[in-house]
Image (tube, helix red, strand yellow):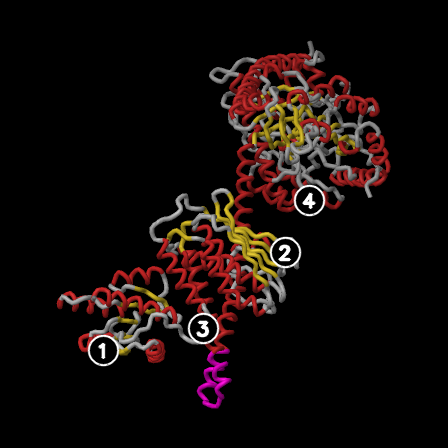
Amino acid sequence: MSTKDNEEQLLRSVAEQNAQSINLARRRAEEALRKQSDWLRVTLSSIGDAVISTDVEGRVTFMNRVAEALTGWSEAEAMGRSLTEIFHILNEESRQPVENPALRALSSVTIGGLANHTILIAKDGTEWPIDDSAAPIRSEQGEVLGAVLVFRDISERKRMELERERLVASAQAAQKEAEHANRLKDEFLATASHELRTPLTAVVGWSRMLRTGKLDAENSARALEAIERNATLQTKLIDDLLDVSRIITGKLILDRRAIEMAHVLNDAVITVRPAADAKNITIVTSFDAETGPVLGDANRLQQVVWNLLSNAVKFTPKNGRIEVGLERVNSQAEISVRDSGEGISSEFLPYVFDRFRQGDGKSTRLHSGLGLGLAIVRQLVELHGGTVNAHSDGPGRGATFKLQLPVLSIKSVPGSKTAARDSTLTSARAMDGLSIECPPRLDGVCVLVVDDDSDTRQMLKAVLSECQADVIIAASAAEAIEEIERRKPDVLVSDLGMPEQDGYELIKKVRGMESADHTAGIPALALTAYAKAEDRVRALASGYQVHLSKPVEPAEFVLVVANLASRRQGRDE
Amino acid sequence: MKIPTEPIGSIPRPLSLLEAIGDRDGTDPALNPLYESAIRDTIERFEATGSPVVTDGEQRKYHNFWTYCVHGLENTAPDGFKIPFSAGHTRRMLRLTAGPFRYKRTADSYLDLAMSYAHVPVKQAVISPSALSLMYPPEEMPGYTREQFIEDLLREHEAEVRACLRKGAHKVQIDFTEARLAIKIDPSGNLLQSFIDLNNLALSRFNGEERMRIGVHTCPGGDIDSTHSAEVDYADLLPHLFQLMAGNFYIALAGEKNRLEVLKMIRAHMKPGHRVFVGVVSPIDPRIETPEEVCERVLEAAEYIPVAQLGTTDDCGFSPFSDDTSTTRDTAFAKIQARVAGTAMASELLGDA
């Protein structure tokens, strides 16, 4: 054997021996690879997403547990089956089959995801909204060996998305509503400003003309009439605002008694008739006397009906017609006010009872007002447990308002007399008299009027003097105490808001003096601009018998003073 | 599509450097200026050819491409195997005398200087684990088993390749010239298969992306204008060669007698994702190929290999053993220039705008 042959033989020998070691190393590497493969399988089985792998033909080669749970197929069942059989997906909306992303990955050799709104139909028919992606599995040389599909149940995510969308929509709606309310408020403020200033124009203008002393008797009378009318109008506007405030804050207190609605309606018709007559509007009434009483606050129900009737007169053109009805419908007293006026558009009809809403909110609108009347109507009716609704066939075709109030199950309840009296008072207040009516004369009645405002003192003195009362005036609580000690008046009329000592302190001292002297109490009337219900309660609790809010109708004022005087007289007799 | 072209690696050293090395240890620091000068000149001349990828010409592999990493180890002896060449001379391997096996130096150390001079990507050649595996003697070494040696060898090789990749080598080329020799020594193919297995064990330590930057070079050897295994039929080699888990293959072709048969075999056994760089110039052929000739060879190869997977190279290094002066530097660069120009011509003809 040559040297060369020996070298080659030796080399072969070494190589052969090396081969054994290389084989050993290879087996170790293969074992490591197998362990790595096992680890990978365990890992894929452990992850929260569903994983399915396929071979290049799209046949399942692996499924983890999550995939088993979502598809309803066990890995053993699925192995070797076509992925389309195991992974059955539809478009959620169209219910049409969706291209399988794993098969697309195999054909296009690209990574891809599902379109939105894809649902997986499990073996048992369960539907799962899913999100997924698929990618080709490549060898080290880039050869496509299969595809891997990863997907997950997105039920919770979709629920959260829907919830989020709902919240966003809700927030947007709330914002829109707030913006709308703000706009309405702005419109209302502009309207309120206008409406409150309008009467003042006449009041201020006529007042200044009167002060010049150059008006003749006829124009002076016209001036005073205008001032009075506008002051009354403004009082109504302020009352409406206060009512809304009371309703909103829940502080409206109802003085519930048994009320015959026919009386209330009659009073209201009488009140609006002059305005209707001025437009030659015919008011036709039809009241069922057997309707039965309702339990309510006479003044507030009067306000409700008056608002409806005033509206009807306001929106009915000349020579129009208004029908007012009262009948019993089952257990309800149904009041209807039907007019032949402008009617209400179908767009505005749903909002006709909303606060600050007017069919025409523009500055050029034809009709004045704050847009509160019907809102107050609804609130008051609902406070009485009733309902109110409006109907119109459209612009120019009139409108009908119907309100229903529960009828009392008994015919007569204690207090109905008082209700009637209140109704009378209200009627008197609403009457448009140029002179003061003094049905109960106050001859010889000594009335002490306490008010820090000189004009008010003088006006009250003039009213009472007109009815033959003996009037003493005081500008402060201290003066009042002196007068009481000196003259012992029959009736005390006092303002509440005064400097140094207010009307509450005054009555407290007066009642203290009476208690100390063991003398009879002077009937006292609190006459104040503090017009809220809580003010009334506080005044009565302090010792006043009656609370009247400013501005007061002279006729009403005289009646109340006479009433108080009669109490004194009754006691004295 | 532009057809990539890359050199194999070695360029004949300047004679001044060889003379300076003489009988001295090539690691003598006094030689550093000469090495540096040789590397700078090599890269300048490489770039002058228009080559899009260059090497340092292996100027610092002062013995050869095979033993650069173990030369000087104290636990080696010079009486390893002899590799006979057709020209009648032999090259001798080192023999490991004791464990543990460690590299004396790694090829990434050459990259630093080369990359400081280069303006184009630099590739780096390393020796295969299978070549170095022959350092372990036939008889088992006391206290250091063959298994331990194989494990150490793989670890050292991996570290060297990783360092080259980390430093930015355009490609890391594993010189596997013993592949064809293995068939010559063991026509049964077992020896080659064990080489393939060993090299795959090394390659399996890299991920797919890394392996796309790793290549394997095979040739019948080229030293003093002769080969050690040109007579071995590629048919016995290529089916095994493409089992290697590398992304790139540098295959000598220009010197083959029947190139078309080789191309058919390449087409039959290459895999998707492989880039096959075929040799279009032959370092052991003294004649300088023309660009047209190279172009013709590229077009010929393109008939068998998809252009997207085709590249060109030299059949072999121009001076794998440092003392080989059979080819001049001028000749080497002229051949390289022809390769670059011919490949560009072919690219244009094949549709590169």
Alpha carbons under labels 4 and 2: distance apart:
84 Å
Place residue A528 in its image quadrant. bottom left
Q: Earlier in the sequence, mark 3 or mark 1?
A: 3
Alpha carbons under labels 3 and 1: distance apart:
34 Å
- In the rendered image, residue A428 lying in the magenta stretch gets the answer no
Which is more toward the observer, A333 or B336? A333
Residue type for callout 3: Gly
Alpha carbons under labels 2 and 3: distance apart:
38 Å
Q: Are marks 4 and 2 in contact (CB under 8 Å)?
A: no
> Is circle 2 on the same chain as circle 3?
yes
A545 with respect to B59 (left or right): left
The stretch in magenta equals: A202-224
Q: Quadrant of the N terminus of chain B?
A: top right
Q: Residues within 10 Å of mark 3 (few under 14, many from 20)?
A: few
Q: Earlier in the sequence, mark 2 or mark 1?
A: 2
Which residue was labeled with disc 3? A433
Which residue was labeled with disc 1? A479
Numbered circle sitting on residue B120: 4
**Of helix, strand and loop, which one carries label 4?**
loop
Which is more toward the observer, B233 or B261? B261
Asked whether residue A228 appears in the rendered view, the answer is yes
Residue A233's spot in the image, x, y percent? Answer: 48, 70
> Is circle 4 on the same chain as circle 2?
no
Alpha carbons under labels 1 and 4: distance apart:
113 Å
Q: Is residue B256 above or below residue A207?
A: above
Which residue was labeled with disc 2? A345
Q: Nearer the viewer, mark 1 or mark 4?
A: 1
